[in-house]
Image (tube, rainbow, N blue to C red):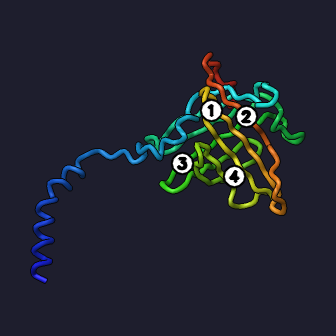
Amino acid sequence: MKNILLSLSILAVLTSPVMARDKNRPVVPCAHPMFRALDFWVGDWKVYHRESGELAGFDRVGRILKGCAIQQSWVSLDDFFSSPMVPFRMNGKSLTAFDGREWTQFWVDNQAGSQVIKGNFKDGKLTLMSKTPIMDHIYKLSWEKQKDGTVHHMAQRRKTSQEKWDILFDFIYRRNASNIPLPKGE
């Protein structure tokens, strides 16, 4: 027992300068590359319907909270998400973060929509799914960086009683190089 205590005491004395240096070194919790895997989505974007090529909206995506979260501000320019009951186009915001195990996104919009989706990267594509059905549907969204620097973003849903996924939207994000400002009233 004395040998164990002596060994622990020597170890504590020898490692204390190392530990003191570590305590004095600033730590940036979300600087690790695994927290930065979605950085390809960060930027100001013009968003197009993939099939028609029509401009769908603008999306401003940026890191906040010392890089620990990604904030999205979506402004729809067409009536793709519109409802006859709602007299204005969809605007929405999301917060996306990585907790060391999985990615989580919380979405809310001006159409009274909200959802929480979770998931991970596989083969360079981030896929997030709703864990709890929303009006009897499960949602799946994905983001994938393309070789030309664009981002492919798709949303799908299926009824909880079915296996077939229906495409809600299929977008291509292109950098807003002309720096067209977001429409007022966001």
For the residues marked 2 and 4, what is the alpha-carbon distance in whole angstroms?
19 Å
- Of callouts 3 and 1, the N-terminal one: 3
Q: Amino acid at mark 2?
A: Phe
Above or below residue 139? Residue 147 is: above
Q: Position of residue 12 (x, y in %)?
A: 15, 65
Q: Residue at label 2?
A: 171
In the image, 151: left or right of 139? left
Q: Residue 179 or 85: which is nearer the viewer? A: 179
Residue picked out by circle 3: 97
Q: Earlier in the sequence, mark 2 or mark 3?
A: 3
The answer to the question of whether label 2 and label 4 lie on touching residues, with beta carbons closer than 8 A, is no
Give the quarter of the figure containing the C terminus: top right
- Mark 3 lies on a secondary structure that is strand
Q: Is residue 157 above or below residue 38?
A: below
Q: Secondary structure at mark 4?
A: strand
Q: CA distance from mark 3 to mark 1?
A: 22 Å
* Nearest to N terminus: mark 2 or mark 1: 1
State how far apart marks 2 and 1 are (Cα).
12 Å
Label 2 Cα crowd, 10 Å radius (few <14 / some 14-19 / many 20+): many
Label 2 close to label 3 by CB (< 8 Å): no
Task: Tell me the residue that label 1 is attached to.
Answer: 146
Secondary structure category for the residue under label 2 = strand
Residue projecting furthest to the right: 84
Q: How many marks?
A: 4
Foreground: disc 2 or disc 1: 1
Tell me the tag on residue 115: 4
Amino acid type for the residue under numbered disc 4 = Gln
Return the residue nearer the eye: 112 or 82: 82
Give the spatial CA distance, label 3 vs label 4: 14 Å
* C-alpha span from label 4 to label 1: 26 Å
Query: Horizontal and vertical percent for residue 120?
Result: 58, 51
Observer-side mark, 2 or 4, equals 2
